[in-house]
Amino acid sequence: MKSLVFILFIILFGTISFAQNIHAYIAPNDTVVIDTTNHQRMLLGYYSRKSFQDTSFSWWFNSLYDMYEIDSTNALSLKDKLNNIQITVVMGTWCSDSRRLVPKFLRIMDFLDFPKDKISIIAVGRDLKGKQNETEGLNVKSVPTIIFYKDSKEIGRIIEFPKESYEKDMLKLLNG
């Protein structure tokens, strides 16, 4: 009987501990809502990359991030061209294209040691709007949309899919 009580205690304690930590990676300022179409959690507005480690998102983000094989030759050619560049990524955590492509893009940026504070990530709902009009004036019609700025002026964007690869498309974009 004591062992049965002990086993039940372990199961109950483990379940409570897991339930309390399941969403521990969502930063206090990040907004998570329920998508009314698929009833899944989705991010809205500006958010931190730490939120990708939440169980609602890590299952797709981490595997695609880790599996992506960087075209290191073309990627390394980008390093000097990224000086004074700011990037805005507009994505939907509900969108299969965003789920597939944004982890790859961020892996390239990490490979290049591109400063994380120079990348803003905006999560949008199916209406392509964030939490508080973060996409107003950005003319976003599809996600993901990755916008490159130099001296606060847009120099180009990659909309939805890269034409060749992120590495090659960024080289063309940054070369003018």
Image (tube, grey):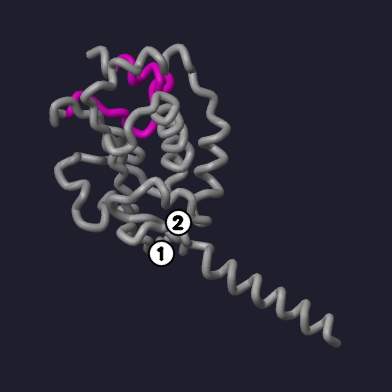
Q: Give the left or right position of residue 100, taking residue 149 as reference.
A: right
For the point 59% across and 70% down, which residue is it? 17
Residue 92: % across, % down:
37, 48
Residue 25 falls inside the magenta stretch: no
Which residue is identified by label 1? 34
Q: Amino acid at mark 2?
A: Tyr
Q: Which element type, helix, strand or loop, lies under badge 2?
A: loop
Residues under numbered marks 1 and 2 in contact, where contact means CB atoms less than 8 Å apart: no
Magenta range: 154-172
Badge 1: few (under 14), some or many (20 or more) residues near its Cα, within 10 Å? few
Which residue is identified by label 2? 25
Residue 24: % across, % down:
47, 61
Quarter holding the C terminus? top left
Which quarter of the picture shows residue 171?
A: top left
With respect to residue 58, does 168 lie above or below? above
Residue 12: % across, % down:
67, 77
Q: Give the left or right position of residue 24, taking residue 130 as reference.
A: right
For the point 51% across and 36% down, which residue is it? 65
